[in-house]
Image (cartoon, grey):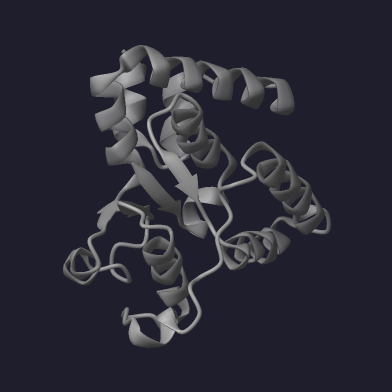
Amino acid sequence: MKIVIDTCVLYPTVMREMVLGAAKAGHFTPFWSARILEEWARAAIKLGPTGEAQARSEIALLRANWPDAELPPAPGLEARLWLPDPADQHVLAVAVRGSADAIITLNAKDFPRRTLSEEGLERLDPDGYLHRLWQASPDSIADAAERVLAQANSLSGGQWEMRALLKKARLPRLAKALGR
């Protein structure tokens, strides 16, 4: 399965690491565009003076780890596409260009299922998708979650628990499943 990852899924660290952990485990092939990555960097400015620099270093690592994942939209394609928010049409154009099966996003209202289905695409919610993957392959998703938890505890110096970390990351169904 080929999936375009929207900015709103890449920007929060825990959500991004969980989704990419599923990709690393072979559940899907990820795609994004330079514009999606730039939106992430610009959004990180809200974190303070080092936010953008941190995002740009994480983007550099993402590009190094996934060298074939970045796609440009097909020339002229964006002009024929329609979404409620024209600023999101580039995401759809990248999905069409990459012959993706789905777009994973938290932004349901701007990616209507009917419009996506006209292009042969599905809209996936990160929590629902990861929960489905966990149901089909619990060990690989649990392993990814353990790595994310260890990284979160290492970076924060804290003692995160799995359920709390995933709930805070807007992954409540997965949190409940893994927190049992």
Q: Is residue 62 shown above or below 155?
A: below
- Residue 34: x and y in percent read 63, 63
* Quadrant into which the C terminus falls: top left
Give the quarter of the image for residue 61: top right
Q: Is residue 122 left or right of residue 3?
A: left
- Residue 85: x and y in percent read 38, 80
Which residue is pictured at 43% across the width and 58% down the height?
Answer: 98
Q: Is residue 27 left or right of residue 115?
A: right
Q: Is residue 47 shown above or below 18?
A: below
Which residue is pictured at 30% across the width and 23% down the height?
Answer: 134
Q: Is residue 59 left or right of residue 26?
A: right
Work out whether residue 180 or residue 85 is closer to the camera in this orientation and state it.
85
Which residue is pictured at 59% across the width and 41% down the height?
Answer: 13
* Quadrant into which the N terminus falls: top left
Give the quarter of the image for residue 92: bottom left
Q: Is residue 20 shown above or below 111?
A: above
- Residue 99: x and y in percent read 36, 57
Which residue is pictured at 65% across the width and 23% down the height?
Answer: 151
